[in-house]
Image: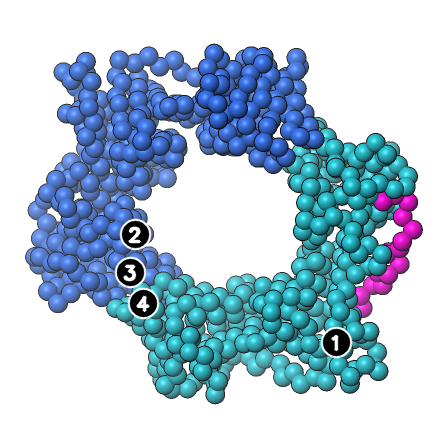
Chain colours: A cyan, B blue
Amino acid sequence: MKFTIKKSIFADCLANVQRAISFRTTIPILTGIKLQTNEKGLILTGSDSTLSIENLIEEKEESNHLSISEPGSVILPSRFLGDIIRKLPEDKITVTVQDNFQTIITSGESVFTLNGTSGKNYPQLPEINSAATFNLPGHLMRQAINYTIISVSSQETRPIFTGIHFELGDNQLKAISTDSHRLSQRIIPITIPESLKDKEKVELNIPGRALSELSRLVNDNENISMMVTNNQVLFKMNNTSLYSRLLEGTYPDTTRLLTKDQKTSIKVNAAELGAAVERALILSHQGKNNMVKLSMDNSGIILSGHSSEIGYVKEKINALGFEGENMSISFNPDYLREALKTFGGQDVIIRFTSPSHPFILLPSEDSDNFNMIQLITPIRTPGN
Amino acid sequence: MKFTIKKSIFADCLANVQRAISFRTTIPILTGIKLQTNEKGLILTGSDSTLSIENLIEEKEESNHLSISEPGSVILPSRFLGDIIRKLPEDKITVTVQDNFQTIITSGESVFTLNGTSGKNYPQLPEINSAATFNLPGHLMRQAINYTIISVSSQETRPIFTGIHFELGDNQLKAISTDSHRLSQRIIPITIPESLKDKEKVELNIPGRALSELSRLVNDNENISMMVTNNQVLFKMNNTSLYSRLLEGTYPDTTRLLTKDQKTSIKVNAAELGAAVERALILSHQGKNNMVKLSMDNSGIILSGHSSEIGYVKEKINALGFEGENMSISFNPDYLREALKTFGGQDVIIRFTSPSHPFILLPSEDSDNFNMIQLITPIRTPGN
């Protein structure tokens, strides 16, 4: 195997596939990156066996300066490869794999010889030829992921909660996540293929880590084609493919949580309330409960937080609207901060039922349906 | 105590004095920042008892927007104060200290109440009225520090090596540091006051941490006045004062190390050789000795490094000059990288005596004296 390539392209693609690699893997071969030529160009692959990322560098794309003079494949140590490539002196890199898989990388007056292994030792990625193929606009998929990823659980005690639950059908994709303290839901319109229209809707649970990486890899103006099998999903973009194993189990029904019978509703700017919460949590993080309180009545909205050691804070919130009963509710400010961030600088409606019921955040421009909803469970305090 | 102030000025000055504070201190009062008014304005103080930084915010400087309506002093928790101030909503901040030292900080609709303590509880900074006062141009002092700080030891086993040794006399300041594996020396011209000219030269050992902070605080175009007592040094800049305890003990005589009888001399560009070393250490860091080798003869210079697991690297170095005997020498590449960085992009002369003797780096433009010298001890290898 022998090729020359432009340094920055090679470095960027190595960084892409490297994100799939876990340095805690128990499978030594997966600490490497596979390089393989095919008729189109050079394919890089990284994997942690649950998540795999493949990146094609096309020979016909002139800006890649890729020229393959001898086809083949090799596995090279990923941790150092990216570092070495980035620091090479010249823009042109030549990679030559010898018969024993020792690989010589030259650039200018610098010559690295790395111990490689045969590409044939690399695990085969799953073959995915699925009837269930969906086309998703990249920017919408990214929105759905970024909106719901905040409520994905990092606790392995209930594995199903470490992923985002997707439901595809009725020309929409519904994404839901919850860690049992909060819930995020985002619905985006998609076109369901004719062949799937009469079937039951497709449901699947994709690990949060795979979706974070997908969100990072996809460009806003490209389409993603998503292929689903029993236990795998494949996201195909222009030159990048991301494979992920699916989470097993049945996702709990969350619809009963999303009711519309709240008694109090306030309208505020997400960025303004977010800034006040950011200040309040400087103190609440030092308290033993990490809790702030929101008190609302006709005269206004007050956010307060305290730490018995350091002091307390009170913030008057600029309310753009208030309807319903007076209310006072306590909650984890980190949850509210993250939820508010998903709305950017938009105005939001927050609806409360009681101090002990979950409250919901909706965009003020589209608060009648639940296309975009963040739900947060309060902290019960002795007074409530 | 009551004052109003511009947010960014207050936040910047808090950040300055906070650098002196150690969160591992065993003296609770020193986790706080002291705020005190005087006839000129507001003074902020932070200290870890070895190092103290004082910052004056002048009332007469209009851009500070400082207006003191009630004089006084208070100690506030430093860890949160800076964070709170930075995140306040408006540019104008009002600070009001109540009788019980509870301190109310308001900005826009945000009101923080912090538990403060009396400024009288804060330890007194040393009174320094010294006859030994030196004036140092800020940019030269910073050069001297940044050039020598790399060889300061982080090991507490020989405390004297955790500082930089200064010698003032003969209209020059000599700064020396060593961790016993390498040595840095920088001489800068200064004006010795008439009153001190007939005296013996002043020698002192200043902790590296204090000097790092000094280098960060000083502006290139300001002068530093340095006052020395038996066990303290005070650096005064425009509005900032830095106090440091001196290290006790006698600094070893290092002059015998700095000889001129080398047998081999090469001239290279510091940045080019530095880049090659950076690449080589990707591999050497994985080897058990962290060692690279430089081989020189008339045909050229080769830098090589290896890790038995990953592979090896050879780099041809673009030599601008070579004189003397063939030489091959092995050393810790981290030392060479840091030494080369102190020369920026300059050309340097490197002089070698033997594979088992320390080698020295000098600027090629001023290689005849030792105003600027980095010395590195090689690693003895079985072959040498």
**Disc 1/disc 2 C-alpha distance (Å):** 57 Å
Mark 2 → mark 4, Cα distance in angstroms: 20 Å
The CA span between labels 1 and 4 is 47 Å
Q: Secondary structure at mark 3?
A: helix
Q: Amino acid at mark 4?
A: Glu
Q: Is residue A256 magenta?
A: yes
Q: Chain of mark 3?
A: B
Q: Look at the picture and state if A330 lies above or below B358.
A: above
> Numbered disc 4: what chain?
A
The main secondary structure of the magenta stretch is loop
The magenta segment is A250-265
Q: Which residue type does callout 1 highlight?
A: Thr
Q: Magenta stretch: residue B117 in it?
A: no
As rendered, which of A9 and A129 lies closer to the eye?
A9
- The span from disc 4 to disc 3 (Cα, nearest Å) is 12 Å
Between B145 and A324, the one lying in front of the other is: A324
For the point 27% across and 18% down, the residue is B133
Disc 3 marks which residue? B276
Q: Which mark is residue A90?
A: 4
Give the spatial CA distance, label 3 vs label 1: 54 Å
* Image quadrant occupied by the C terminus of chain B: bottom left
Q: Which mark is residue A191?
A: 1
Q: Residue at x 20, y 62 (%)?
A: B318
Q: How busy is the neighbourhood of tag 2: few (under 14 within 10 Å), some, or many (20 plus)?
A: some
Q: In the rendered structure, the residue with mark 2 lies on which chain?
A: B
Please name which of the two marks, 4 or 3, marks the residue nearer to the observer: 4
Q: Which residue is mark 2?
A: B337
> What subunit carries mark 1?
A
Q: Is residue B336 visible?
A: no
Q: Pick the quarter of the image with the N terminus of chain B.
A: top right
